Image: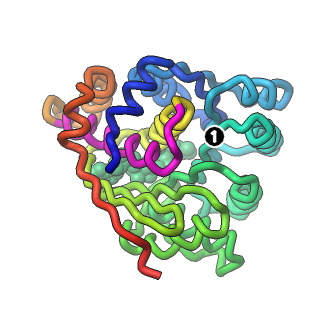
Amino acid sequence: MINPSVTLAHVRANAPLVHNITNYVAMQTMANVLLAIGASPAMAHAREEAAELASLASALTINIGTPSIDWLGAMGEAAHAANRAGTPWVLDPVAVGATAFRRQAARRLANLRPTVIRGNASEIIALNAVIDDQNPTAGGGKGVDATDSIEHAEAAAQQLARSTGAIIAVTGPRDLVCDGEQIAMIDNGHPLMPRVTALGCALTGVIGAFLGAGAEPFEGTVSALAYYGLAGQQAAQQAQGPGSFAVQFLDALAAMDEATVDREARISHRSCKH
Ligand SMILES: Nc1ncnc2c1ncn2[C@@H]1O[C@H](COP(=O)(O)OP(=O)(O)O)[C@@H](O)[C@H]1O
Ligand SMILES: Cc1ncsc1CCOP(=O)(O)O
Ligand SMILES: [Mg+2]
């Protein structure tokens, strides 16, 4: 039985420092989302300081949305520092199927033992293909957007969990979390969420905050997804479209009543099929 409110309460009480090496598009949205949930965000991608900051933080997130060679060096050093410090870290393989450069970057990072990997269905299918040395074009995706269904990504998520040792979170109209043995499905969320850029990237930060507040990785990831989706549902009730939704969404994350999360989280659990 997962109680999403427990970790939300820990985040609010402890304000974990979350170090993010994220993309130019997501930086401000992600920082605002982390502040709204009660965490303390820090964005830092210089190679000169990435490892030092990662070893101070409660959690690290690494996102390849706008990659460059310099940033990749910082990402690798930060991931190693997090591993040395026993700090949880989350990988967001944005648009990994799109280019050879992203495939190479994501393969290197996924092999550095991330605690959680979160992506949309197409990203998880593509990353699994990369790690498994399959056809590099496996997994559709249109740039940063998904073209595959969650159901279609289930086998890839399971295989990727087993090959990397990470918890795999696949997000979309429904969310799926897999640790290689068990699967949780989360049926919260709203169709306006993918109409605002960087809400997936910001969610990666929220997972980081939940783990940084001490949650066990599988439970913490499921809890973060349920809370986030529920905030999307609440925001949509007030919104006129994507613009006002973005504003309402921050307010909904901040105002979320902890008992409401436990009551309205739609989480189901089962074993993996194979
Ligand atoms: N069609 C949808 N209906 C409900 N929730 C959605 C939908 N698409 C995405 N979401 C939610 O939006 C958030 C970001 O997920 P997603 O759009 O898959 O990430 P990304 O931006 O990385 O592709 C998640 O909380 C997910 O549940
Ligand atoms: C549009 C875009 N281009 C490069 S990164 C990025 C943001 C992607 O954000 P998300 O994966 O949360 O939609
Ligand atoms: Mg994304």
Amino acid type for the residue under numbered disc 1: Pro
- The residue stretch that appears in magenta: 214-236
Task: Look at 58% across and 65% down and name the residue there.
Answer: 161
Q: Position of residue 230 (x, y in %)?
A: 25, 40
Q: Is residue 196 left or right of residue 61?
A: left
Q: Nearer the viewer, residue 218 or 164?
A: 218
Q: Is residue 25 above or below residue 129?
A: above
Quadrant in the rendering for residue 136:
bottom right
Q: Position of residue 20 (x, y in %)?
A: 62, 32
Task: Specify the farthest residue to the right.
Answer: 48
Q: Is residue 29 left or right of residue 190?
A: right
Q: Which residue is mark 1?
A: 88
Q: Position of residue 270 (x, y in %)?
A: 35, 68
Asked if residue 65 shows in the view, the reply is no
Q: Secondary structure beneath disc 1?
A: loop
Q: Is residue 118 left or right of residue 5?
A: right
